[in-house]
Amino acid sequence: MAWLIALPLGLAIVYLAARYGRFRSWIEPVLSIAVALGLSVAFLVWLNEAAPDKAPEPAPNRPAAGLTVAELTLRDMAFEPNETEGTFRVRGTAANASDVTLEYFRLTVTLEDCPQDACKRIGEDTALILLRVPGGQNRPFETFLTFPYRPDEAPTAPKWTYRVSEVRGAGRR
């Protein structure tokens, strides 16, 4: 909006300087000093913004009030091999027992091979599940996990262990 004032003022100064030589001899030094002061102030403002006084404090990483890992229940979990070797499709249902709407959660899954009850850990993977679940409701979800292993070490008796490692809820709107 300042340009609405500066434009007519600038045009008036240019017109008067072109028309009257006495005005030109007076306005040239005044405008030169004004431009130099303006550039100096802009440089000082830029320097102050470029170098903050202190490092900003990190925002606390707290979940939304009322939503905890314990209030999210996973049901009907199914693990099935995918087309690509070492990847698995995971399906399940997330039930939100809180009053707060769930935005996302992190699912951490551990795969073990347990032939004859002698378990050998193959690996662990964590997936970010973007899923809006209003309080008191449940929604199905699906994701893919990767467990790298050699073809000759493919699990013959897979044992799946899963847990929710983080939840994030949305405040009421």
Image (cartoon, rainbow, N blue to C red):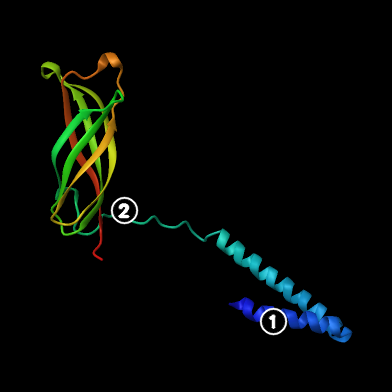
Type of the residue with mark 1: Pro
Residue 106 vertical position relative to residue 57 in the rendered view, above or below:
above
Say which quadrant the N terminus sits in: bottom right
Q: Nearer the viewer, residue 132 or 170?
A: 132
Residue 30 location (% of width, % of height) = 78, 80
What residue sits 65% from the left and 70% below the top? Answer: 41
First of labels 2, 1 by sequence position: 1
Q: Tell whether 15 sits left or right of 101.
A: right
Tag 2: Cα neighbours inside 10 Å, few (<14), some, or many (≥20)? Answer: few
Q: Nearer the viewer, residue 21 or 83?
A: 83
Circle 2 or circle 1, nearest the eye: 1
Residue 16 location (% of width, % of height) = 81, 84
Say which quadrant the C terminus sits in: bottom left
Q: Tell whether 27 sits left or right of 134.
A: right
Q: CA distance from mark 2 to mark 1?
A: 52 Å
Q: Residue furthest front?
A: 83
Tag 1: Cα neighbours inside 10 Å, few (<14), some, or many (≥20)? Answer: few
> Residue 135 lies in what quarter of the image?
bottom left
Which structural element holds mark 1? helix
Residue position marked by numbered label 2 in the rendering: 61
What residue sits 52% from the left and 61% below the top? Answer: 53
Residue 77 location (% of width, % of height) = 15, 37
Residue position marked by numbered label 1 in the rendering: 8
> Residue 109 lies in what quarter of the image?
top left
Type of the residue with mark 2: Asn
Which structural element holds mark 2? loop
Q: Tell whether 83 sits left or right of 163.
A: right
What residue sits 65% from the left and 65% below the top? Answer: 43
Residue 78 vertical position relative to residue 173 in the rendered view, above or below:
above
What residue sits 15% from the left and 56% below the top? Answer: 98
Residue 8 vertical position relative to residue 120 in the rendered view, above or below:
below
